[in-house]
Image (spheres, helix red, strand yellow):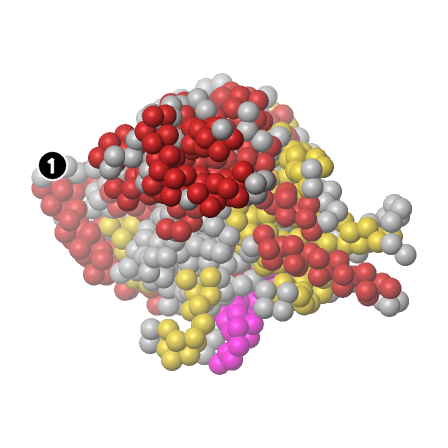
């Protein structure tokens, strides 16, 4: 087995046993990136010097007997995470020249434990998209089928795992941006409970929905990564000061008596038959493992997409106001006066999808429309939260598909925003409810495309969904399948 | 037709916290441009605000001191607009749920008391500032200094209860006295630490519907507030009487002309698209916090003013002057604690001490004469050791050297002469040398009396007890 095929825990074993050094592992990853990157396009920026320097430091720690499970593990970050001294673009021309003076808390935490940074990953511009097609830095392809999208917005984060260009990655999830690409690329992706991971230093799209999470090769790695980045951060007022459990220890394999809810609203006519079949097999698997199934209802599901596109765009319209060409980022060279400078810089710096969402959000917050749109959306959001609270009175986790179909073709939905938005229909409610969910590989379509299953947990119930996902993983082989790249 | 002006004020109070409202940067004034900034106040991508607890404490103090109710839950909101000095493209403020609601202040204008309602007090961050002209590396351009960005402000909004410019000024002064008294604002209007926008409208007397209002910005002294409001009232009345209508607009006061001019109309007014800031959780203040703040609240200027009148017998006017600032009131009470003659101390504080402070451009906090020294001085007068006139000489020496008044009196031999024998001897000498004037006095020209007093005082080098001089002189002349 090649180094780039390993999981975190497997590579950690080899590093600790001195079978391989962090520098060798990093070299292997960089070689792999170089080999497959022209086909995939997972990265916006590769940082070989940084990676090798990190790896040398990691080797010194390992030699000193201070190796942590993440020490010397080559990782990559969605280009939405600020990395001090390393260009951070958020997939936008607006930030093509932005070198941040500080780093995101989540990256700081990984770095403190000795992780190695391979580079910054491709994504939809400002995390707005479900296909990675809105990136200003070129297309990212699905390693399972290079004519298809990897999903989005953390497309590069998922594609890099599937293409074995990184051992693990971090992404962000505002409406499914970790889980949907994880599902399309056959990897594990977790969106933690809102407040579980600091957002400090993560470029904001929709602040009340954004959450940082890992994309990994298996559930154990996911537990390791989550444990490393979770926890209160005094720099983020919305991060919650509640203890971080040992997520790896939660992977006991025992799910006897686990009550799994199946929401009728998610198993709809029109669901891709391969996806439906994969879910049926997953349910069968869980029955064998001793889980019980309960039919539940999440009655406000139908309103989730509309609610999301009001709240997320409203927040985005304000969050993206700081990109005005005054202090950093793109400034139009042609502008004469002040207003022209701001207008031109924004017109040139932002892509079409970002502009569309800024306009939608500006409209939703405008005087005379606020009550009808933003305020009403907030009320519906409360109803959606209540749906989950009620459902969780009777079940421990909720099982759904991650996306209605496997990965679609590049260009297929690019001119139909509404169709594109509907690809997040099963993931968006989780963000609105502020709770946690994990996507795990649960099958392949007839044409060999990965299909993911989503397990939704109670707020701060990450241990439960990880245990359930892990038990499933132990009983199946989907996570061992490799993209034919 | 007679018109009734209606005025409401929005006052911005810059808080005296060491650090900014949403980050740890210093709030010090006058530092090198952009030297007091960080990712948060620069509005860098990914940066998030964290509320400074001191700001909340100050806001609660201001609310309690202005009789507001403190909201158990308040919410920060984003006010969205583009401007180069506004780094995030929005200002974090409070909108629908501010920290303080429904208070009031009592004011006095020409002896008439009036209660002015306070609609709300909310917390917000200040913007940076633009610098135009010659800049490092630029002959002519515009620069942005973000040192002030994210500095904490309170906005205190009054009800439209004010009817004249004088009332507006009285309200503003009262508010100024309270926030400086509480130590939450330095009150410096020139530097913009205490600034005011005025909403002015007029309506026919007896009308029940308010007129269209204009908002006047940029009035940064009490005098300008009076000028700006008076001019605006006149402008609106003239306009209506000439058959015109007042339009809703923002007007700028120009201190050079004393007039207001249109800045932007209703059509150009911003739609700020307020919405709750998702980066900050709602602020919850429990009863315990409010109770503690109430307990820690100092005696307020108005209460102290009333107490000075009842306890020390000073006049209404004197009490108001003595409580103009907390330092002055503390100084005065420091003196009175050592020497109980409240009226005499008041006269000295408001007289010689204030004059000396003004002449030297010092504040009461920098006063070289301590309350103890001033109390000693007044004690010397009251015990008859020195005369009031001599005391002024002693005061000047105390001001210069900071020495004990008793020591100065002794060293310079300034003890008052109250020995009637010695004074009589002087009087006899003066009367003998001025027989002509003695005749005049006895002939009914009583004005000459003053001449004799002057002569006696001069002969005694000012040390003769003036009361005794009067008494003895009168006896001699009459006799």
Left or right, residue A31 beside residue B367: left
Which residue extends farthest top? Answer: A257
Residue A29 seen: yes
Of B293 and A113, nearer the camera is B293
Question: How many residues crowd mark 1 within 10 Å: few (<14), some (14–19), many (20+)?
Answer: few
Label 1: chain?
A: A
Left or right, residue A154 beside residue A112: right
> Which residue occupies 41% across, 62% down?
B145
Q: Position of residue A334 (x, y in %)?
A: 49, 81
Tell me the quarter of the image containing the C terminus of chain A. Answer: bottom left
Stretch of the chain drawn in magenta:
A334-360
> Which residue occupies 13% across, 46% down?
A59
Q: Mark 1 highlights which residue?
A: A65
Of A53 and B64, nearer the camera is B64
Q: Position of residue A469 (x, y in %)?
A: 43, 33
Above or below, B302 relative to A197: above
Q: Position of residue B453 (x, y in %)?
A: 44, 39
B278 inside magenta stretch: no
Quarter of image, res B385: top left
Left or right, residue A75 beside residue A395: left
Above or below, B208 relative to B42: above
């Amino acid at each position: 087995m090649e180094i780039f095929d390993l999981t975190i825990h497997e590579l950690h074993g080899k590093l600790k046993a001195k079978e391989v050094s962090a520098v060798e592992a990093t070299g292997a990853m960089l070689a792999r990136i170089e080999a497959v990157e022209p086909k995939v396009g997972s990265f916006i920026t590769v940082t070989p010097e940084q990676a090798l320097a990190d790896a040398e430091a990691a080797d010194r720690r390992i030699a000193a007997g201070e190796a942590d499970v993440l020490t010397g593990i080559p990782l990559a970050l969605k280009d939405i995470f600020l990395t001090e001294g390393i260009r951070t673009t958020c997939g936008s021309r607006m930030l093509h020249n932005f070198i941040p003076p500080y780093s995101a808390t989540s990256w700081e935490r990984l770095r403190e434990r000795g992780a190695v940074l391979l580079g910054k990953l491709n994504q939809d511009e400002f995390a707005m998209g479900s296909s990675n097609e809105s990136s200003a830095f070129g297309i990212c392809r699905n390693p399972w089928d290079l004519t298809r999208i990897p999903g989005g917005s953390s497309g590069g984060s998922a594609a890099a795992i599937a293409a074995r260009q990184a051992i693990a990655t971090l992404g962000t999830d505002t409406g499914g941006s970790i889980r949907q690409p994880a599902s399309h690329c056959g990897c594990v992706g977790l969106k933690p409970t809102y407040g579980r991971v600091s957002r400090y230093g993560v470029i904001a799209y929709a602040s009340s929905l954004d959450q940082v999470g890992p994309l990994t090769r298996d559930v154990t790695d996911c537990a390791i990564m989550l444990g490393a980045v979770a926890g209160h951060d005094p720099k983020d007022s919305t991060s919650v000061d509640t203890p971080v459990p040992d997520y790896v220890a939660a992977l006991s394999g025992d799910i006897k008596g686990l009550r799994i809810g199946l929401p009728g609203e998610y198993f709809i006519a029109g669901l891709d038959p391969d996806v439906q079949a994969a879910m049926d097999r997953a349910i069968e698997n869980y029955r064998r493992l001793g889980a019980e199934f309960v039919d539940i209802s999440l009655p406000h599901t139908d309103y989730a997409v509309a609610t999301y596109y009001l709240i997320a765009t409203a927040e985005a319209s304000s969050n993206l106001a700081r990109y005005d060409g005054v202090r950093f980022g793109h400034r139009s060279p042609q502008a004469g006066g002040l207003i022209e400078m701001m207008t031109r810089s924004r017109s040139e710096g932002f892509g079409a999808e970002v502009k569309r969402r800024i306009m939608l959000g500006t409209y939703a917050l405008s005087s005379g429309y606020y009550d009808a749109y933003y305020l009403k959306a907030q009320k519906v959001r409360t109803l959606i939260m209540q749906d989950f609270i009620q459902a969780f009175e009777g079940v421990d986790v909720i099982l759904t598909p991650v996306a209605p179909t496997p990965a679609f073709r590049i260009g297929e939905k690019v001119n139909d925003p509404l169709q594109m938005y509907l690809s997040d229909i099963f993931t968006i409610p989780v963000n609105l409810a502020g709770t946690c969910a994990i996507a795990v590989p649960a099958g392949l379509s007839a044409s060999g495309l990965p299909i993911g299953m989503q397990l939704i947990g109670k707020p701060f119930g990450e241990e439960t969904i990880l245990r359930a996902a892990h038990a499933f993983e132990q009983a199946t082989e989907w996570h061992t399948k490799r993209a034919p790249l | 037709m007679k018109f009734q002006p209606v005025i409401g004020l929005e006052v911005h109070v810059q808080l005296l916290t060491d650090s900014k409202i949403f980050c740890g940067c210093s709030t010090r004034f006058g530092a090198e441009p952009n030297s007091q900034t960080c990712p948060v106040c620069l509005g860098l991508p990914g940066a998030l605000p964290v509320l400074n607890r001191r700001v909340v404490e100050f806001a609660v103090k201001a609310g309690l001191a202005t009789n507001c109710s403190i909201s158990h839950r308040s919410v920060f909101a984003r006010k969205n607009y583009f401007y180069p000095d506004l780094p995030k493209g929005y200002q974090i403020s409070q909108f629908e749920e501010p920290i303080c609601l429904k208070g009031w202040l009592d004011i006095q204008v020409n002896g008439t008391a009036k209660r002015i309602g306070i609609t709300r007090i909310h917390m917000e961050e200040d913007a940076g500032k633009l610098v135009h002209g010659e800049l490092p590396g630029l002959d002519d351009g515009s620069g942005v200094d973000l040192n002030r960005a994210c500095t904490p402000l309170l906005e205190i909004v009054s009800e439209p209860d004010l009817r004249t410019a004088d009332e507006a000024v009285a309200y503003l002064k009262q508010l100024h006295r309270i926030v400086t008294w509480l130590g939450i604002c330095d009150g410096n209007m020139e530097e913009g630490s205490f600034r005011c926008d005025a909403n002015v409208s007029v309506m026919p007397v007896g009308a029940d519907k308010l007129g269209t209002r204009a908002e006047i910005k940029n009035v940064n002294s009490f005098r300008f507030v009076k000028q700006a409001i008076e001019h605006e009232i006149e402008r609106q009345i003239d306009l209506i009487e000439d058959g015109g209508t007042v339009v809703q607009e923002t007007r700028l006061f120009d201190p050079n002309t004393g007039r207001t001019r249109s800045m932007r109309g209703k059509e150009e007014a911003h739609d700020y698209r307020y919405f709750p800031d998702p980066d900050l959780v709602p602020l919850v203040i429990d009863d315990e916090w409010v109770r503690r703040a109430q307990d820690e609240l100092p005696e307020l200027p108005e209460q102290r003013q009333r107490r000075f009148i009842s306890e020390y017998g000073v006049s209404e006017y004197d009490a108001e002057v003595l409580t103009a600032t907390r330092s002055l009131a503390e100084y005065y009470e420091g003196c009175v604690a050592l020497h109980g003659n409240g009226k005499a101390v008041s006269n000295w504080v408001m007289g010689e001490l204030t004059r000396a402070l003004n002449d030297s451009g010092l504040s009461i906090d920098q006063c070289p004469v301590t309350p103890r020294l001033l109390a000693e001085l007044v004690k010397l007068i009251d015990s008859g050791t020195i005369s009031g006139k001599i005391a002024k000489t002693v005061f000047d020496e105390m001001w210069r050297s900071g020495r004990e008044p008793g020591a100065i009196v002794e060293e310079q031999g300034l003890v008052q002469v109250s020995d009637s024998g010695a004074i009589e001897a002087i009087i006899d000498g003066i009367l003998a040398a001025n027989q002509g004037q003695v005749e005049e006095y006895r002939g009914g020209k009583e004005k000459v009396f003053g001449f004799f007093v002057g002569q006696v005082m001069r002969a005694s080098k000012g040390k003769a007890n003036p009361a005794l001089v009067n008494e003895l002189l009168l006896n001699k002349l009459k006799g």
